[in-house]
Image: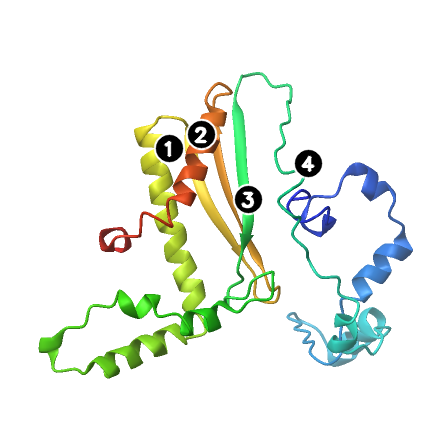
């Protein structure tokens, strides 16, 4: 994660050294800065009197500064993916273990849940401007439905806010199936392999991670095979049977 996100520590487990550098004041400021008064709801469940809960609210939440969400957003530091030409792109770590085994990971950028990418692109716009999709739609002339009507239905589907979330979910399942079929079943290079997407709602990016377990002797071949499966998506198009 540090390699992919340019050393950004917000998405990794803190180290003992970083924890020891924390102070109570730093932690308090970090927590209090999370609260905003323009869109915050406090839900309280229990057996209490109105006077008791009022005093507790005053004690625990009464010192929250009046901060708007937009004001806090000004201090947001954007997430930046590291460029591919990096010394950290390929890493190997050797750990002492009771058994000889190996784990490998491949990670890279992906859009968020709504189709926004880290480089500022909106995939919805590129999809609407592309004729590739329409070229692969087979219209049934005998159904009595006009071609324009069917294109309108497809346009509504692609315009749905969750279109990219559903599409990426289907794509992840297809990639997982191909990885299992190729890397595990056909080549026998791994015990287990999985493709997972991290899709965010507010961040304008996401990422994917392929993880696999293997033996040290086969792990490099397994990595190459996983890369080959990913790259083949451009040439080996997804078949209807895979979607079924």
What SS does tag 1 mark?
A: helix
Residue that numbered label 2 is attached to: 222
Looking at the picture, tell me which residue is in the foreground, 61 or 209: 209
| Residue indicated by mark 4 | 87
Q: CA distance from mark 3 to mark 4?
A: 15 Å
N-terminal-most mark, 2 or 3: 3
Q: Callout 2: 10 Å neighbours few (<14), some, many (20+)?
A: many
The image's mark for residue 107 is: 3
Residue at image position (55%, 48%) is 108
Q: Which mark is residue 183?
A: 1
Do the CB atoms of the residues marked 2 and 3 lie less than 8 Å apart? no
Q: Nearer the viewer, mark 3 or mark 4?
A: 4
Give residue 178's quadrant in the image.
top left
Tell me which label, 2 or 1, sits earlier in the chain.
Answer: 1
Q: Is 86 placed left or right of 25 in the picture?
A: left
User: In the figure, is residue 41 to the left or right of 146?
Assistant: right
| Quadrant of the rendered image containing residue 183 | top left
| Image location (x, y in percent) of residue 126 | 46, 69
Q: Is residue 134 rendered to the left or right of residue 50? A: left
Q: Find the residue positioned furthest to the left.
A: 142
SS state under label 2: helix
Specify which label sits upstream in the sequence, 1 or 3.
3
In this view, the residue in front, 81 or 132, is 132
Tell me the number on the disc at residue 174.
none
């Amino acid at each position: 994660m540090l390699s992919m996100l340019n050393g950004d520590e917000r998405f990794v487990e803190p180290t003992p050294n970083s924890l020891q550098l924390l102070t109570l004041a730093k932690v308090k400021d970090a927590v209090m800065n999370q609260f905003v008064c323009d869109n915050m709801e406090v839900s309280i469940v229990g057996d209490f009197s109105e006077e008791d809960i009022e005093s507790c609210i005053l004690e625990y939440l009464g010192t929250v500064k009046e901060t708007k969400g937009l004001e806090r957003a000004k201090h947001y530091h954007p997430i930046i993916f590291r460029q591919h030409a990096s010394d950290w792109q390929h890493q190997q770590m050797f750990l002492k273990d009771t058994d000889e085994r190996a784990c490998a990971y491949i990670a890279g950028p992906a859009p968020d849940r709504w189709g926004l990418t880290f480089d500022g692109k909106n995939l919805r716009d590129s999809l609407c401007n592309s004729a590739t999709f329409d070229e692969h739609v087979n219209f049934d002339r005998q159904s009595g439905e006009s071609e324009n009507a069917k294109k309108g239905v497809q346009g509504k589907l692609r315009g749905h806010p969750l279109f990219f979330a559903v599409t990426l979910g289907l794509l992840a399942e297809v990639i997982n199936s191909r990885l299992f079929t190729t890397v595990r079943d056909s080549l026998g290079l791994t015990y287990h392999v999985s493709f997972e997407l991290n899709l965010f709602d507010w961040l304008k990016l996401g990422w994917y991670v392929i993880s696999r377990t293997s033996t040290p002797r086969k792990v490099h071949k397994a990595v190459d095979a996983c890369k080959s499966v990913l790259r083949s998506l451009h040439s080996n198009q997804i078949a209807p049977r895979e979607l079924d």
